[in-house]
Amino acid sequence: MKSFISLHVFFLVLIKTTSSQSIIKTLPGYPGPLPFKLETGYISVGEDDEIQLFYYFIESERDPATDPLVLWLTGGPGCSGFSGLVIEIGPLAFDLETFDGSFPSFIINPYSWTKVASIIFIDAPVGTGFSYSTASKGYSTSDTKSVNDNYLFLRKWLLKHPEFLKNRLYVAGDSYGGKTATMVALEIAKGNEAGLQPQMLLQLAKRNCHGEYVNPDPNNYKCLYALQQFDECTKFIRWPHILEPRCISVSPKPNDFLSGRLFPEDDPLDLIFLSEQERPWCRNNNYLPTSIWANNEMVQEALHVRKGTITNWTRCNGTLSYEYDVDSILKDHQLLSEKGYQVLAYSGDHDLLVTYMSTLKWIRKLNLTIDDQWRPWYLGGQIAGYTEKYKNNQAYITFATVKGGGHTAPEYMPKECLAMIDRWLSLFPL
């Protein structure tokens, strides 16, 4: 799920802040001065300010004084905001056409969301990207603790940047970030107030699993059998985008790229006998430049990263000490709807990790009134996806699919996603 939630807020409560911030005018890998304003820094949160959350802030390239402010929460949990910046919606992208495994170079992303909004990309929760803790206790986190940290981060950031207090504020996230975005938005709202045929398998699962498909009863053998058949049908499909080759799930390392190990694992084909030209392309190759770039000493010095705080930067940290203690955010969305906040939820229609049908299902559980029936939305005379709009008093939820999009839709369909967000921020119908 990806969420984009509108919040008109003003943080006026004085709180203790410990932070550092730097304006970055040049970056290794980009020729010449950056054509946009980039700020990096740390904001301290936690009981004793032991957690140091690193962020990248890019001002809107259009009109930062009036354009919206977006807090972008990359998913995982544990994936750096830098991933959202250079792979999804930021103004820079790596030049993959010329990348040969050495130090990568940047090109400009013509579909950056910073053309219409100012964006804060945060490394959260602690242990993600360049964020760290000065005490070991700080690294133990969870859904609720991470949300509280993000909320406090935003309050402190705005106190350091009071010129943005008057701007419309949006909390956005992709993948798991869609969950935390909703919870952060609710905190802000509170703060303002104080082998078989598919149809046969489907029926078999519905009949025997009783709606529990994630943690089924281990003694319910009929349900387990149905779910096993589904697994057999999908285990060689790349879940983030069903049309692409299945790749390893961890962030690639330089040696993996050079040795040619970035190809589908558990593949029924014996890749040993395939030539390099015959081997399937793997999207994980696109992520390798992030590790090479962010682990470079010159880069960290340019970003003003504190020396010795991070020994090995990874795009997505899969070793976080993290407790998943929130099962559902349905009630949070209901409260946001009752309070009159606007929401955009979008899904790539080729995503099997969080399918658009599952997102549509929970939206309809909110029991809202349909304001605009399911219909296509267009870009350049072509169908770019489908949309439906719901209302509850003054609150609206707009749901949109992005045709051809994967799990992180802007990564796959940048032009369409920029058009989608520009229209929604401008209060135009999709």
Image (cartoon, rainbow, N blue to C red):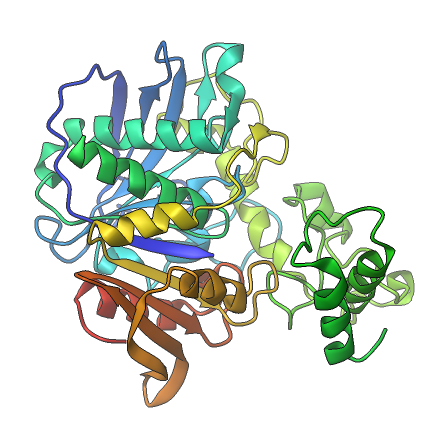
Depth check: 376 or 26 in front? 376
Q: Is residue 246 left or right of residue 333?
A: right
Q: Quadrant of the C terminus?
A: bottom left
* Residue 187 higher or lower than 286, as above or below: above
Question: Residue 339: horizontal and vertical position, in percent?
Answer: 21, 49
At x 90% / y 60%, what residue is drawn? 272
Q: Is residue 203 left or right of residue 359?
A: right
Depth check: 276 or 228 in front? 228
Quarter location, residue 89: bottom left
Question: Residue 427: horizontal and vertical position, in percent?
Answer: 17, 67
Depth check: 30 or 40 in front? 40
Quarter location, residue 33: top left
At x 40% / y 67%, what residue is drawn? 414
Residue 171 visible in the current orientation = no
At x 51% / y 33%, what residue is drawn? 296
Question: Residue 136: horizontal and vertical position, in percent?
Answer: 53, 11
Residue 154 visible in the current orientation = yes
Question: Residue 302: horizontal and vertical position, in percent?
Answer: 36, 31
Depth check: 352 or 404 in front? 352
